[in-house]
Amino acid sequence: MKTFFLCVSLFITNQKLQSQSVFLKDLGQNKKFDSPIENPVKVKKYRGLKFCERKSKLFFDTLSYESKLNNRESAAILILINPLGQKVSFRIWKVDIDAGANEKIKIVSIRGQGISDPYAQLSGDSGPGGMHIQVRSVNGDYFIEPYYPKSSKKYISYFRSDLAENVRPPDKLEESNLPVRQPPIKN
């Protein structure tokens, strides 16, 4: 009986590990995709990725909530492909969010800590609009998102520094760029 439970446990663990490592496939640098619309994200350089939505949903459904994790070392491992084509790993967990009026829309918000780069922080979501990941790292901030809105299989990975100049957010906000708060109007 113990052998049976051990085999079932190993099979489930193997299935989880496989779903973690294979739902993104590297297609190469500046991969041109056939798409119904032009890519709204203007980047000089990016990495094309093939995304398996079914396997990612299975994986995201198995994640533990941050509030229920006793130890982050026990969190699930997500393997991504950075803009250089390198596989990078993160321990990730679900984050509790207020669904508000749209409780019918299933969106999973995630956060994570780098394993291959311990200083990297991951945040993202997965839902009807696809998966969106942002990684902040001393080695360069980067994003993974659909090539065009609602694309289910075509994704890109790119560094913030590779965004076209006219769409790049400032690296540092200067106080003069921030809006000035006005005092309330008294009647």
Image (cartoon, rainbow, N blue to C red):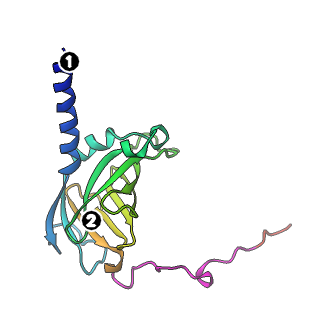
Tally of numbered tags: 2
**Is 137 covered by the magenta stretch?**
no
Quadrant showing the C terminus: bottom right
- Say whether marks 2 and 1 touch (CB < 8 Å): no
Residue for point 61% across, 78% down: 178
Residue 81 visible (yes or no): yes
- Per the model, the C-alpha gap separating discs 2 and 1 is 49 Å
Front in this rendered view, residue 85 or 37 = 85
* Mark carried by residue 138: none
Residue for point 26% across, 40% down: 58
Of helix, strand and loop, which mostly describes the magenta segment? loop
List the residue tagged with mark 2. 148
Q: Is residue 68 left or right of residue 130?
A: right
Q: Where on the picture, by quarter, is residue 49?
A: bottom left
What residue range appears in magenta? 164-182
List the residue tagged with mark 1. 2
Residue for point 18% across, 38% down: 14
- Location of residue 93 in the rendering, given as x and y in whole percent from the top left corner: 40, 46
